[in-house]
Image (cartoon, grey):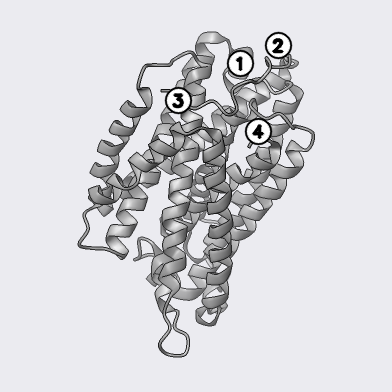
Amino acid sequence: MDKFTSKHLGFVIVGVTVISLKSYPSLFTRNGGRDTWIAMGVGCILALFYLLFMLHIFKKSNYLSLADLYSAAVGKWLGRFFLLLFLGTLFLTIVESASVEANSMHTNMLLGTPPWMFLLFFIPPALYTVKKGIASIMTITLISMVLVSLSGMNLAILTAPYKHYDYLLPILEKGITKGLILSMLQILGVYGSVSIIFPYISDIKDRKKIIKYQMIAMIFVIQMEFVALAGVIATFNIDFLNTMSYPKLLQTQLISEFEFLEFGELFVMLQMVGGWFVKYVLTFTALIKLLESMKLEVKHLSYYISGLCFICAYYLSDNLFLLFKFLNYYSYISLVNFIIIPFLIFLLYALRGFPNAAPPPPITHHSKKLTN
């Protein structure tokens, strides 16, 4: 891979946004009830327009780096403060990726295997991948996202006989409630992971159709998430669904063909392990890129981050209730630091007339390995 293009960035969008909303939908349905699919629809539309607006501002700024754009909008020190909030949320995202993968596999698949064992086979390989550079990262992302998408399509077909769409009725039985609004905000917050692509944008060489390809990728994600959420509600009914931690893992256990062939777990394990691994790697890389752009490089920093992530993820993945409490807070933190603050800063940058909008320096480090 000799260059990083806008087509590759589309796969990054899929890699960082798909897995979270599919893994723990009960976090949202406990607030929104059977009408959570409506909250999902609203959240999807808002996320789509958010991404379109942000990419438009990047284009108008001649693709300044995220750090430069923040500084141009609100000044050096305030910009750095908001970037630190963004960095902190990136770290929480890699903790989310590691802890949910370990806990979901421990809870639903291999109860006798402790979560720390899953983390040992997750975090070090992810660090190795990150340090091999952008070519390796994108190769794994492209292969994994194609396989995850195919497995998702297969699961949608195989679970179709078990879905009862009358479980979605009546629509808005209690009107627009506080819980439905909170559900929509949580969904939008988790969709905030799309902001993880921002540190990658200044590295793109082929930018002619950047908005087109990212819109295609985002629409692909939206239809996948909407179908998946409506599908689990239609499979279990809302009261039963709200008692589950990872309903997709249980949904696949219903699959049985010819009364002896049961293989739904194969597809969902691919989705869970592969999807969370890709999100972790892409988020970790974005974290390192942003630190480099802020001149905050520290020798062996990636090892320190991985070690701290292991400690946090082990603490969370060892307790299911604590993990979901974290995920509940994380959705709102992501809403603020991945959606609201970046949107306001980009809006202020546009209102100020796009100051310092100049082409970035020539890019020479696409294939350079991350050395931290």
- The kind of residue on which mark 3 rests is Leu
At x 60%, y 27%, the residue is 366
Q: Which residue matches tag 3?
A: 85
State the quadrant of the N terminus: top right
Q: In the image, is residue 18 above or below residue 134?
A: below
Report how far apart the C-alphas of labels 1 and 4 lie in the structure.
26 Å
- The kind of residue on which mark 1 rests is Asp
Does dot 3 land on a helix, a strand or a loop? helix
Q: Nearer the viewer, mark 1 or mark 3?
A: 1
Q: Which residue matches tag 2?
A: 356
- The kind of residue on which mark 2 rests is Asn
At x 45%, y 25%, the residue is 85
Circles 2, 3 touching at the beta carbon (< 8 Å): no
Q: Nearer the viewer, residue 190 or 144?
A: 144
Report how far apart the C-alphas of labels 1 and 2 lie in the structure.
9 Å
Question: Which label's residue is closer to the chain start, 1 or 3?
Answer: 1
Q: Nearer the viewer, mark 2 or mark 3?
A: 2
Question: Which label's residue is closer to the chain start, 3 or 4?
Answer: 4
Does dot 4 land on a helix, a strand or a loop? loop
**Badge 4: residue crowd in 10 Å (few <14, some 14–19, many ≥20):** few
Report how far apart the C-alphas of labels 2 and 3 lie in the structure.
23 Å
Circles 1, 2 touching at the beta carbon (< 8 Å): yes
Position of residue 163 in the picture relative to residue 73 (left or right)? left
Q: Which residue matches tag 1?
A: 68
**Badge 3: residue crowd in 10 Å (few <14, some 14–19, many ≥20):** some
Circles 1, 4 touching at the beta carbon (< 8 Å): no
- The kind of residue on which mark 4 rests is Asp
Question: Which label's residue is closer to the chain start, 2 or 3?
Answer: 3
